[in-house]
Amino acid sequence: MSGETITHDKDAHRYSIVVDGTEAYLTYERPAKDRIHITHTIVPDKIGGRGLGKRLVTRAMEDAIAAGDKVSSSCWYASGLIEKTPDWSAQLA
């Protein structure tokens, strides 16, 4: 799993990772300069069960923290991880 790289397309507001030719991704919106809103975390069944969703949310949160951004989420998966991680929940908008 360490060989796959997460890419961040800032213009498209999207983090993605490709495994075995299939893409998993996280999308977000930027409602304000210092805020991101996570909208979806999608991991196709074909590559599910490998922790890819968690890796995508982790990367988005690490980037948000590094930038000093506040975070909100309408994605049930990302919201659950954020709420369970004390360092991340402090970033909630």
Image (spheres, rainbow, N blue to C red):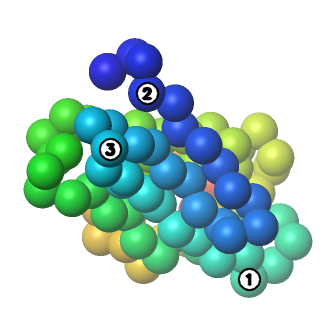
Quarter of the image where the C terminus is located: bottom right
Q: Which residue is mark 3?
A: 21
Q: Which residue is mark 2?
A: 4
Q: Quadrant of residue 25?
A: bottom left
**What is the crowding at mark 2: few (fewer than 14 residues within 10 Å), some, or many (at least 20)?**
few
Left or right: where 55 falls relative to 64: left
**What is the crowding at mark 3: few (fewer than 14 residues within 10 Å), some, or many (at least 20)?**
few
Q: Which of 46 and 25 lies nearest the eye of the viewer?
A: 46
Asked which secondary structure carries label 2, the reply is: loop
Return the x and y of residue 3 as percentages of the image width and height. Answer: 42, 18
User: Mark 1 or mark 2, which is nearer to you?
Assistant: 2
Tell me what residue is drawn at x 50 percent, y 51 percent.
16
Question: The disc labelled 2 sits on which kind of residue?
Answer: Glu
Return the x and y of residue 23 as percentages of the image width and height. Answer: 37, 52
**Contact (CB < 8 A) between labels 1 and 3?**
no
In the rendered view, tell whether residue 64 sits above or below residue 1. below
User: Mark 2 or mark 3, which is nearer to you?
Assistant: 3
